[in-house]
Amino acid sequence: MSNPYDPSDSGRQESDPHHGDGAYGSGSHGDDSSGSYGSQPYGQANPYGQPNPYGPAPGHPEPHGVGPYTSGPAMKTNGLAIASLVTSLCGLLGFFCGIFGLAAPVGLVLGVIGRRQVKENPMTQTGDGLALAGIITGAIISVIMAIFLLLYIAFFGLSIFSSYNY
């Protein structure tokens, strides 16, 4: 018995009187120029690599990049948010060492500005958590430093006005 799917099998061609002279081409299976099923329409090499001939769907922009699953614009961490956390932590170090003691209020201000910038541009910037951590750390250290400064002035600052001579 002959295989109807094998193009090299000539047994079917001899026994089928309609093979080769019909409306579907010359009868050579797999020949792309014949217009039969499986050939590429209009001479295109790969229709899947071609752009959509109908354009994008209404209300949806044409996708950028390769394929429909592109990531979009790159998200960058806000520099002021990073600087806020770093300077607030330097203020914490300065609280114990005496160096960089005024860095905590600077970190607080940088955190507020950085957080505002991140909220204004949520599609391009990240770092809201860093800015918030800088705000909280800077505020706590600033308040503690203010309390210690007031206590220092209360105990040692008023001693210059006393009349005791040691």
Image (spheres, helix red, strand yellow):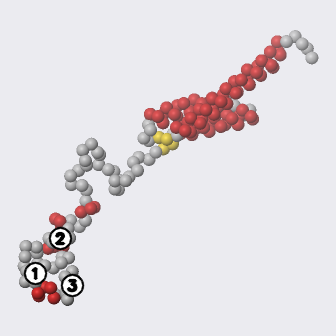
Which residue matches tag 1?
19
How far is mark 1 from mark 2, CA to CA? 15 Å
Q: Residue at x 44, y 37 (%)?
A: 121
Q: Is residue 62 left or right of residue 91?
A: left
Q: Nearer the viewer, residue 130 or 79?
A: 130
Q: Is residue 31 left or right of residue 98?
A: left
In primary-sequence order, the first of circles 1 and 3 is: 3
Q: Residue at x 66, y 37 (%)?
A: 90
In terms of secondary structure, where does tag 3 sit?
loop
Which residue matches tag 3?
3
Is residue 20 visible in this depiction of the protein?
A: yes
Q: Nearer the viewer, residue 68 or 84?
A: 68
124 to 166, vertically: above or below:
below
106 to 57, vertically: above or below:
above
Q: Amino acid at mark 3?
A: Asn
Q: Amino acid at mark 1?
A: His
Q: Nearer the viewer, residue 117 or 25?
A: 25
Q: Residue at x 91, y 14 (%)?
A: 165
How far is mark 1 from mark 3, CA to CA? 14 Å
Q: Residue furthest top?
A: 163
In primary-sequence order, the first of circles 2 and 3 is: 3
How far is mark 2 from mark 3, CA to CA? 19 Å
In terms of secondary structure, where does tag 2 sit?
loop
Q: Position of residue 32 (x, y in %)?
A: 18, 73
Quadrant for the C terminus in the image: top right
Q: Position of residue 75 (x, y in %)?
A: 46, 45
